[in-house]
Image (cartoon, helix red, strand yellow):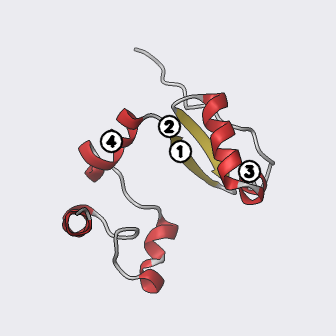
Amino acid sequence: MSVLTPPLGPRGKLVSGNLPEFASNPLRFLSESARSYGPVVRLRFGRTSAYLLNEPGLIEEVFIAKRNDFIKSKALRAQRLLLGNGLLTNENESWLQQRRLAQP
């Protein structure tokens, strides 16, 4: 049996995680994280973990091939009241229909 180790990422602060670094310069923070930690980077924003994918094949796998295996976070789903049920907040077949309409 093999043991999977979680992806590495920048350490961050005890309580806020990587939020201060991200907030000060998001593009620089994400670029440096990708260069330093490879194709999958674990980020922490408070008590929430997020993963940065830096390889086209992985991005395609998550957003296309296995899109039904991933769900939006509770926080993002809660934004439906404010943002509506668009591409950012929608999921499953309804999301796919919207994506196909927007694609051209």
Where's the N terminus, which quadrant?
A: top left
Q: Which is more N-terminal, label 3 or label 1?
A: 3
Q: Are marks 1 and 3 in contact (CB under 8 Å)?
A: no
Mark 2 or 1: in front is 2
Residue at the spot of label 2? 54
Q: Which residue is mark 4?
A: 60
| Residue lying at the far front of the rendered structure | 104
Say what amino acid the circle numbered 4 marks.
Glu
Mark found first going from the N terminus, 2 or 3: 3
The numbered mark at residue 17 is 3
Numbered disc 4: secondary structure = helix
User: Which tag is nearer the camera, tag 4 or tag 3?
Assistant: 4
Q: Residue, x 59% and y 49% (percent of image)?
A: 49
Return the x and y of residue 4 as percentages of the image width and height: 48, 24
Rendered image quadrant of residue 101? bottom left
What is the residue that sits farthest to the bottom in this orientation? 82
- Going by the numbered disc 1, the residue's amino acid type is Tyr
Marks 2/3: CA–CA distance: 20 Å
